[in-house]
Amino acid sequence: MNDKKISEKIGQLLYNETPDPDKLTNLLVHINKNVTDMTLWVGKIKSKETGFSLSQEGNQEIVKLTNELWGIYQEVPNSSWNVAHYMLSPEDQSFKIEFENSKELENGKIAFWKYSKKHNS
């Protein structure tokens, strides 16, 4: 499967599982050697009130698809990343992904929950 197909599947999964399809849906995923961390929220601000969880099947599928996407990009020069921020926007009917390479997360200098706070708009 290519990166475009994987992105489409992730976008559709988020659309199917978001508790409020009329608001911006965010999924932040950190890929690590041993574990995949993720956090989800609706709207621009990440908080206890805006957070939600995927179904067990949705969670497994996101992990699988994100790992596939990571594998594809590892073969492309200068495209190293360990964090993917998926954003589903009903306002402009778009889905986009921003990739980041966090040395702090990689080296264990910051916890994922703390790192994810910087994504509040």
Image (cartoon, rainbow, N blue to C red):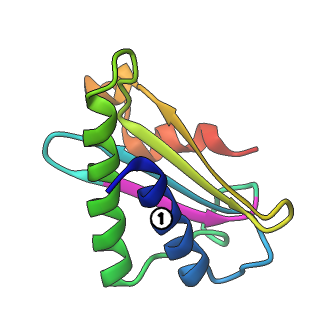
**In the picture, residue 71 is in which quadrant?**
top left
Kind of residue at badge 1:
Ile
Q: Is residue 38 above or below residue 104?
A: below
Tell which of 98 and 113 is nearer to you. 98
> Which residue is located at x 61 percent, y 37 percent?
118
Residue 63 percent across, percent down from the top left? 30, 61
Q: Which residue is mark 1?
A: 10
Q: Residue furthest left?
A: 34
Q: Is residue 42 visible?
A: yes
40 in magenta = yes
Above/below status of 49 relative to 114? below
Nearer the observer, 100 or 106: 100
Q: Is residue 2 above or below residue 93?
A: above
- Seen as rendered, the residue at the extreme right is 91
Q: Residue at x 54, y 82 (%)?
A: 17
Q: Secondary structure at mark 1?
A: helix
Residue 121 appears in which quarter of the rendering? Answer: top right
Rendered residue at 55%/73% (across/down): 12
- Which one is nearer the viewer's eye here, 118 or 12? 12
Which region is colored magenta?
Answer: 37-43
Q: Position of residue 65 (x, y in %)?
A: 33, 59
